[in-house]
Image (tube, rainbow, N blue to C red):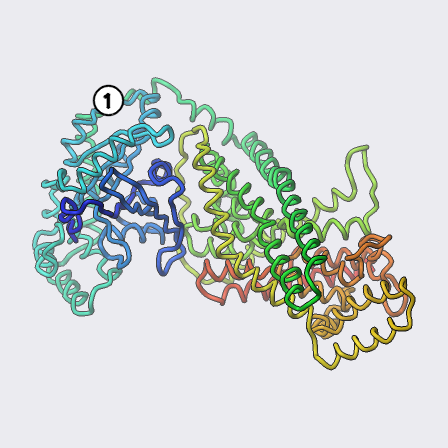
């Protein structure tokens, strides 16, 4: 085990920077402590090779000591099962080449100390310099639990500090102990928590002959998991030989170790912790769970909560979204009138600014969505949602943790797919990623709104049930049903055979931490802007080029034709010709040629070439459909008729209406089911680390959309 090397120099440096790994069980208050110590001085990335968040932050410990705190994923023990647990495990075993902590800051939940002490004792036996931060002391007191912290320190052999990061209590004392540990005023625990050497004496000695700096307990883990460590082939073979020579049994050793640890933990608890009889009082959490997890009322309350969550995303986000759109329209209008007519001004106004608008307009929804989800997580209700929905989700190949990403997909599939990282089972996580884009995201709303207004009468039933609203709700329900159906099919297609266990801890109910909510909202917005935003901008610029340019000969012929016509026209006619020229330019651009090229393929769905162009441009963002239609029907400038009126009067070459009920329903179903979002595909590639699954997603969603739209059109025509 690598020993402290940096701290030995710390007394000789006026200012130093030490690396502290923050570890602990899930729901132990680790994130709250990280946010309290680092504030907004955080960076979020990925650990190399895995899509697991790597959160780091800077913290000033004292005047001469600054630190980088690495927030490792929560884990229950040093025997990892999930990808995020393996990340934390490898760091603590010194097997991560990028992260080398000098101090372990170990968070333990005082209200559930027995369970937390298992992990604490394992980390202590690795012989790192360890500081334990004891959280949830207020909850422990409410439960009638009393802890002798000084006695606990003596038993564990490491400093223990009580903190309340939600109220910033105990942080100065914690920083003082961290500084003393960094300066080696606290040393690593001399004695082991249990006699690790007795687990496999000869095998441990042989491993330590290869790696003299390992602790006895670290040597046990090298015997069990050396295949997962970056060791040379010779060392791997040598450890294999040690296992065979000493008939080392990993399963038996692990079981014996855990039994010994819990035996010792019971002794520590008996001497230093006073716990009330659990039957003496019924806790508030248990009383509330009797209602919220009720087999009838629980599901009704869940539906109300999800309805309010879903509605709030739109209620709250519409104002900043409208403000962003309004601001960009003002800027674009002002620049369009101020700048000379040139390719670079067109690129700036219709390329860069349009792309930036398309990115920023989604930031409010993403921030509000993750803010509300963080409120549910902080309150403890999120775990109950997963628990209630697990039974239904398992029938279609998912599990209870798939629910929140799918609900998040109603706002935007990009952050929804990012939030699937908390699903441990690889197959269930992959299935959730593959079906989440079938949830009707907010980008589809402009498309649904204008098409419903075209073909669905504005009738009301019983005085308050709007027919148009019912159609809109039907589209959302259809997306949910199709997601469940597709998942049922894909669970037989995807051949990952990882056994699934739905093990979920139900945390106590607590009041939300507003600072934590704010930090999470900012972090998620940054991730969206830096990752998906760059891709959306590139796609927008590409689409601007395809829509603005075409084969030189064709474009020159169009310009000459209209220039000649304008020379002979009146001023009023010239204005009409200028607007018409935009549409003809688009028709002869590369995008227009693509639209004409795919018209034979989309004609069976009831679409013309103009809709074909919209289908292509919508890959940047589905709401681009409305802007594309505006350009095609020449209503971007002042006109007596609206886009809806123009679309309503649009006709085909044979004089029939374009937007009939059959065409509109077919088009809505296509937009509901098709994968028309390059940023979503990019995020899927980022999360799965391969282009295979984005390609599968694009193929199956496009095929499904085509078939369903074809059926709808021919049933209704």
Tell which of 119 and 198 is nearer to you: 119
Tell me what residue is drawn at x 57 percent, y 31 percent: 301
Q: Is residue 55 above or below residue 303?
A: below
Tell me what residue is drawn at x 15 percent, y 32 percent: 155
Q: Residues within 10 Å of mark 1 (few under 14, many from 20)?
A: few
Tell which of 249 and 610 is nearer to you: 610
Q: Position of residue 364 (x, y in %)?
A: 57, 44
Tell me what residue is drawn at x 43 percent, y 48 percent: 422
Q: Is residue 300 above or below residue 221?
A: above
Q: Is residue 593 something that shows in the picture?
A: yes
Tell me what residue is drawn at x 40 percent, y 47 percent: 501
Q: Position of residue 38 (x, y in %)?
A: 35, 41
Q: Is residue 338 left or right of residue 581?
A: left
Q: Position of residue 595 (x, y in %)?
A: 72, 70
Considering the image in quadrants, where does the C terminus appear? bottom right
Residue wearing tag 1: 274
Farthest-out residue, top: 280
Tell which of 633 and 325 is nearer to you: 325
| Res. 94 image quadrant | bottom left
Q: Is residue 675 something that shows in the picture?
A: no
Indicate the secondary structure of the residue bearing disc 1.
strand
Q: Position of residue 124 (x, y in %)?
A: 18, 42
Q: Is residue 292 left or right of residue 47?
A: right
């Amino acid at each position: 085990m690598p020993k402290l090397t940096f701290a030995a120099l710390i007394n000789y440096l006026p200012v130093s920077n030490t690396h502290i790994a923050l570890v602990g069980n899930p729901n132990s208050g680790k994130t709250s402590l990280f946010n309290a110590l680092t504030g907004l001085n955080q960076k979020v990335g990925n650990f190399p090779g895995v899509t697991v968040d790597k959160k780091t932050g800077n913290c000033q410990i004292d005047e001469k000591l600054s630190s980088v705190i690495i927030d490792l994923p929560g884990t229950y023990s040093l025997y990892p099962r999930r990808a995020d647990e393996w990340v934390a495990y490898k760091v603590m075993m010194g097997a991560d080449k990028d992260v080398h902590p000098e101090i372990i800051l170990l968070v333990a939940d005082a209200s559930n100390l027995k369970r937390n002490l298992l992990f604490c004792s394992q980390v202590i036996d690795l012989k790192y310099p360890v500081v334990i931060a004891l959280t949830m002391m207020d909850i422990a007191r409410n439960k009638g639990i009393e802890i002798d912290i000084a006695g606990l320190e003596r038993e564990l052999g490491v400093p223990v500090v009580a903190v309340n990061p939600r109220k910033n209590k105990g942080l100065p004392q914690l920083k003082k102990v961290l500084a003393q540990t960094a300066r080696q005023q606290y040393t690593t625990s001399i004695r082991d928590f249990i006699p690790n050497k007795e687990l496999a004496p000869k095998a441990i000695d042989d491993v330590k002959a290869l790696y003299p700096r390992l602790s006895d307990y670290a040597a046990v883990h090298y015997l069990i998991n050396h295949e997962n460590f970056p060791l040379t082939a010779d060392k791997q073979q040598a450890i294999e030989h040690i296992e065979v020579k000493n008939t080392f049994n990993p399963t038996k050793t692990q079981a014996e170790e855990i039994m010994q640890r819990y035996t010792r933990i019971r002794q520590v608890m008996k001497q230093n912790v006073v716990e009330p009889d659990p039957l003496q009082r019924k806790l508030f959490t248990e009383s509330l769970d009797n209602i919220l997890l009720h087999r009838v009322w629980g599901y009704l309350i869940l539906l109300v909560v999800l309805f309010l969550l879903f509605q709030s995303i739109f209620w709250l986000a519409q104002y900043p979204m409208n403000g962003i759109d309004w601001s960009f329209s003002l800027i674009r209008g002002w620049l369009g009138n101020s700048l000379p007519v040139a390719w670079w001004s067109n690129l700036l106004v219709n390329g860069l600014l349009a792309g930036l608008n398309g990115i920023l307009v989604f930031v409010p929804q993403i921030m509000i969505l993750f803010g509300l989800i963080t409120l549910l997580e902080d309150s403890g209700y999120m775990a109950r949602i997963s628990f209630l929905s697990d039974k239904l989700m398992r029938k279609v190949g998912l599990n209870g943790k798939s629910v929140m990403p799918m609900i998040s997909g109603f706002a935007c599939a990009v952050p929804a797919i990012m939030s699937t990282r908390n699903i441990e089972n690889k197959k269930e996580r992959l299935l959730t990623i593959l079906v989440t884009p079938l949830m009707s995201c907010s980008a589809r709303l402009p498309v649904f709104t204008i098409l419903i207004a075209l073909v669905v009468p504005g009738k009301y039933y019983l005085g308050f049930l709007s027919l148009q609203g019912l159609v809109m709700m039907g589209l959302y329900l259809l997306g949910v049903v199709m997601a469940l159906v597709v998942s049922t099919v894909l669970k037989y297609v995807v051949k990952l055979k990882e056994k699934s266990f739905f093990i979920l801890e139900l945390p106590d109910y607590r009041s939300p931490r507003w600072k934590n909510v704010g930090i999470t909202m900012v972090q998620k917005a940054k991730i969206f802007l830096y990752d998906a935003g760059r891709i959306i901008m590139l796609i927008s610029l590409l689409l601007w080029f395809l829509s603005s340019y075409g084969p030189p000969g064709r474009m020159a012929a169009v310009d000459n034709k209209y220039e000649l016509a304008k020379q002979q026209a009146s001023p009023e006619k010239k204005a009409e010709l200028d607007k018409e020229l935009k549409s003809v330019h688009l028709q002869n651009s590369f995008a227009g040629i693509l639209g004409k090229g795919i018209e034979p393929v989309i004609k069976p769905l009831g679409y013309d070439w103009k809709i074909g162009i919209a289908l292509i441009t919508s890959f940047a963002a589905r709401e681009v459909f409305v802007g594309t239609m505006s350009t095609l029907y020449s209503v971007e400038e002042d006109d007596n008729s609206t886009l809806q009126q123009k679309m309503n009067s649009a006709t085909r070459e044979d004089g029939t209406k374009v937007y009939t009920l059959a065409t509109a329903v077919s088009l809505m179903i296509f937009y509901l089911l098709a994968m028309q979002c390059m940023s979503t595909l990019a995020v899927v590639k980022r999360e799965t680390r391969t282009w295979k699954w984005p390609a599968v997603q694009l193929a199956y969603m496009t095929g499904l959309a085509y078939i369903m739209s074809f059926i709808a059109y021919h049933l209704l025509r």
